[in-house]
Image (cartoon, grey):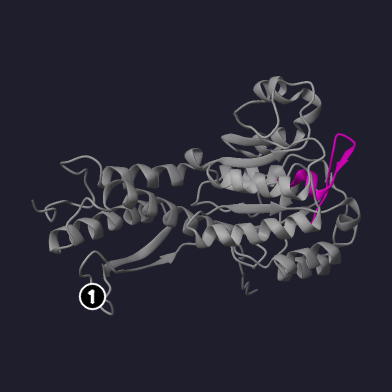
């Protein structure tokens, strides 16, 4: 049976190939199906939850029932930021280092898009989590980690920037600004879940640069030179512009654009999953099978192209590596589309 008659811009005759890629692409663009924030919850007294268990939360009422109203601020922030769901893992009382290892191992078997702590800023566990992020990337599990610091860190941007430099990872975002809401201050570690929700809930063809956050002020207003230094370090900075508080620029700690990295994560995740579900072990490694795979990947990328995620798509067999036996080598290239973030005017008078 030949697959060459499939038109990458139309629905396929048979189910399970193009349509899966198309649906995956639409989900990435809308952001809804990709809005899962993972949080290891420290305290849940007064609720029905038990230790070392997973709970999926979509609203504040369910969170209150499970964990108690006094313990859900991080969950509320993530939902307010735009997360569709919060995947909560309940830590045991007085958790030890081994419990954090167990927590991370448990999360590896669950799907989520952004990981964030429940207001914690322990340097050792942040570093261990950074290593975990890197290991998972190697194992083809792609997600972001949003970190923050203490009140003392937030007052001295040099400390926050040093934390950013220590991470320097495409998949890690480091918030260095604390915020004030209704007269109460929250550290950057406490407010990091909101940023995690914002990232998870924003479509991959949108940037969080200049997005307004619903706070009254930042705990320290940075001068222009301090903002520039923070951006040069790769820190995520919240700025009060005289009227509102906004994200200055959506950057990872490696100084990459969050929009760009999330698009790469989405593409890697979707192609890997759909290949497992529909291609590996199911297609012959001949011209027909190879063209079916190429056309399906092109169709997925073209859906992203229509929605301004990327452009200039090329998907071919890799000319440097013969696709024989049970191995197929593809060469894929495209150009990422960024948001306008710097506008330069020349005004002649």
Please state the extent of the stretch shown in magenta in the rendering: 175-192
Q: Is mark 1 on a helix, strand or loop?
A: loop
Instruction: Say left or right for 135 vs 240.
Output: left
Point 18% across, 62% down: residue: 285
Q: Is residue 183 above or below residue 315?
A: above
Point 72% across, 22% down: residue: 64
The one nearer the camera, 320 or 51, is 51
Point 26% across, 47% down: residue: 18
Please, which residue is most extreme toward the left here?
Answer: 1
Specify the quadrant of the image occupied by residue 302: bottom left
Q: Can residue 251 be seen in this view?
A: no
Q: Where is residue 191 in the image (x, y as percent from the top left)?
A: 76, 44
Question: Can residue 182 be found in the magenta stretch?
Answer: yes
Q: Can residue 41 be seen in this view?
A: yes
Question: Can residue 247 be found in the magenta stretch?
Answer: no
| Residue pointed to by mark 1 | 322
Q: In this view, does 326 lie above or below 79?
A: below
Q: For the residue carrying disc 1, how many other residues have a C-alpha within 10 Å: few (<14), some (14-19), or many (20+)?
A: few
Q: Position of residue 135 (x, y in %)?
A: 57, 61
The one nearer the camera, 319 or 333, is 319
Instruction: Say left or right for 318 vs 117.
Output: left
The one nearer the camera, 135 or 223, is 135
Instruction: Say left or right for 11 vs 237.
Output: left
Q: Position of residue 93 (x, y in %)?
A: 80, 35
Q: In which quarter of the image is the C terminus?
A: bottom right
Q: What is the total number of numbered labels drawn onto the structure image?
A: 1
Please, which residue is most extreme toward the front here?
Answer: 98
Q: Is residue 303 above or below residue 41?
A: below
Q: Position of residue 297 (x, y in %)?
A: 30, 56
Point 53% across, 51% down: residue: 206
């Amino acid at each position: 049976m030949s697959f060459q008659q499939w038109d990458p811009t139309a629905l396929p005759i048979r189910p399970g190939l193009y349509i899966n890629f198309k649906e995956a692409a639409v989900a990435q663009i809308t952001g809804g199906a990709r809005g899962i924030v993972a949080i290891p919850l420290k305290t849940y007294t007064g609720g029905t939850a038990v230790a070392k268990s997973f709970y999926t939360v979509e609203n504040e009422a369910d969170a209150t029932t499970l964990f108690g109203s006094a313990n859900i601020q991080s969950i509320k922030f993530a939902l307010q930021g735009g997360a569709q769901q919060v995947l909560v893992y309940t830590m045991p009382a007085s958790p030890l280092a081994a419990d954090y290892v167990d927590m991370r191992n448990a999360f590896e078997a669950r799907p989520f898009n952004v990981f964030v702590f429940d207001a914690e800023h322990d340097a050792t566990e942040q570093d261990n989590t950074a290593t975990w992020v890197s290991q998972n990337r190697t194992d083809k599990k792609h997600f972001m980690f949003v970190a923050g610091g203490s009140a003392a860190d937030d007052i001295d941007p040099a400390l926050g920037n040093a934390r950013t430099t220590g991470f320097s990872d495409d998949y890690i975002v480091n918030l260095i600004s604390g915020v004030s809401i209704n007269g109460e201050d929250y550290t950057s570690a406490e407010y990091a879940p909101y940023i995690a929700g914002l990232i998870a809930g924003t479509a991959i063809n949108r940037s969080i640069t200049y997005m307004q956050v619903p706070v009254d002020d930042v705990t320290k207003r940075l001068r222009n030179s301090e903002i520039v230094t923070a951006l040069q370090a790769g820190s995520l900075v919240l700025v009060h512009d005289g009227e509102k508080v906004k994200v200055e620029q959506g950057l990872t700690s490696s100084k990459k654009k969050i929009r760009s990295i999330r698009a790469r994560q989405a593409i890697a995740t979707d192609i890997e999953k759909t290949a497992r579900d529909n291609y590996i072990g199911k297609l012959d490694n001949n011209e027909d099978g190879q063209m079916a795979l190429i056309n399906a990947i092109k169709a997925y990328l073209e859906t992203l192209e229509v929605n301004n995620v990327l452009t200039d798509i090329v998907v071919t067999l890799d000319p440097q590596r013969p696709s024989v036996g049970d191995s197929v080598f593809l060469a894929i290239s495209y150009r990422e589309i960024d948001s306008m973030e710097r506008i330069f005017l020349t005004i002649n008078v």
